[in-house]
Image (cartoon, helix red, strand yellow):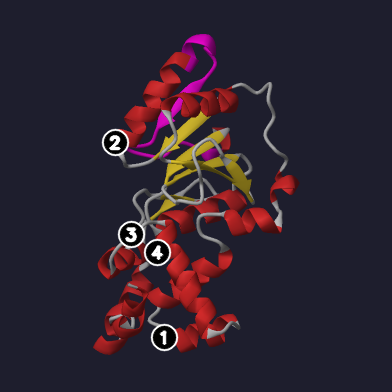
Amino acid sequence: MNILIHSNNIYFNIGLAQCFRDIQETLPGLNIIHSLPLSHLPDLAGMDVIILALENYHDYQAAAELAQRYPGLVVGFTSANNVRRGRAFYADTLLWVSQRESVHEIGRLLRRLADRSRPFAPRHQRQSHSSRLRAPLNDLEMQMIRGVVDGQSINQMADALGVNRKRVYNGLERIKMNFRLVSHTHFHHFMTAEATFSHLCADHSCYRSGVRPARQRRVASRPAENHSYNLNEFHKLF
């Protein structure tokens, strides 16, 4: 069984490697691959599980795109408050695990991943509405963040999403609380920072992480008051 740990966070990689070390002694066929020291990414067709450490919006966006196209299992380690210790769960095609999980529980989870005697939940059983809402970032919240990054006002977002202003404010407030974003600067960084790992594509290639150059050019060309992401409105969240 081949498991790819795809993260640029060296401490995350070392921690998982330590957890896998004991497991590999009892499962000699287990092959753990770390993408960090590699000059090129391995062929995803040979990977059974991909493990990601998620830190910002673009990480979650990349994980969602990968999970929709990749036939294997994608595991996302998240800092979101609504993913609790000891309660890993599926949402669509992603298995969400808390970054605050105990070493013992992570070891138990990884052993289950490595031991095929316990099959994973079939893909069609992960497509429930409730599991989507429980995801660290649900579809509506992802659209809200895209609206913020594109410079939309609260009114523009409400019109585009077909919801009222209060729903938009509540959605942004939930993101702030769920990820413990204690200031506007922290919130802004979470929404606009580039992905912390290179994106993986279904055709087994990789592309540049973070915001695409075309989007960067569009952002740079906006008036200053629009590029500020409507600070006056978003300051109301804090």
Query: Where, by quadrant of the figure, is residue 160 drawn?
Result: bottom right
User: Residue 153 has which mark?
Assistant: 1
The x and y percentages for residue 32 are 45, 25
The residue identified by callout 2 is 10
Badge 2 local density, few (<14 within 10 Å), some, or many (20+)? Answer: few
The magenta span reads 23-44
Mark 3: which amino acid? Glu
Rounded to the nearest angstrom, the CA distance separating label 4 from label 2 is 26 Å
Q: Residue at x 59, y 25 (%)?
A: 112
Say few, some or many: other residues with alpha carbon within 10 Å of mark 4 (under 14 / 14 to 19 / 20 or more): many
Q: Secondary structure at mark 3?
A: loop
Residue at mark 3 to residue at mark 1: CA–CA distance: 22 Å
Q: Which of pointers 1 and 4 lies earlier in the amino acid sequence?
A: 1
Look at mark 3 in the image and give the residue it sits on. Answer: 194
- Of badges 3 and 1, nearer the viewer stands 1
Q: Amino acid at mark 1?
A: Ser
Q: Nearer the viewer, mark 2 or mark 1?
A: 1
Mark 3 and mark 1 lie on one chain; the one further toward the N terminus is 1
Give the left or right position of residue 183, taking residue 46 as reference. Answer: left
In this orientation, does residue 37 appear? no
How crowded is the residue under tag 1: few (<14 C-alpha within 10 Å), some, or many (20+)? some
Q: What residue is drawn where x is 30% and y is 62%?
A: 182
Q: Residue at x 29, y 84 (%)?
A: 221
SS at circle 4: helix
Alpha carbon of mark 3 to alpha carbon of mark 2: how far?
Answer: 17 Å
- Assess whether residue 228 is covered by the magenta stretch: no
Residue type, mark 2 in image = Ile
Image coords of residue 190 (percent x, y): 34, 61
Q: Are marks 3 and 1 in contact (CB under 8 Å)?
A: no
Label 2 vs 1, first from the N-terminus? 2
Residue 199, compared with residue 103, is above or below; it is below
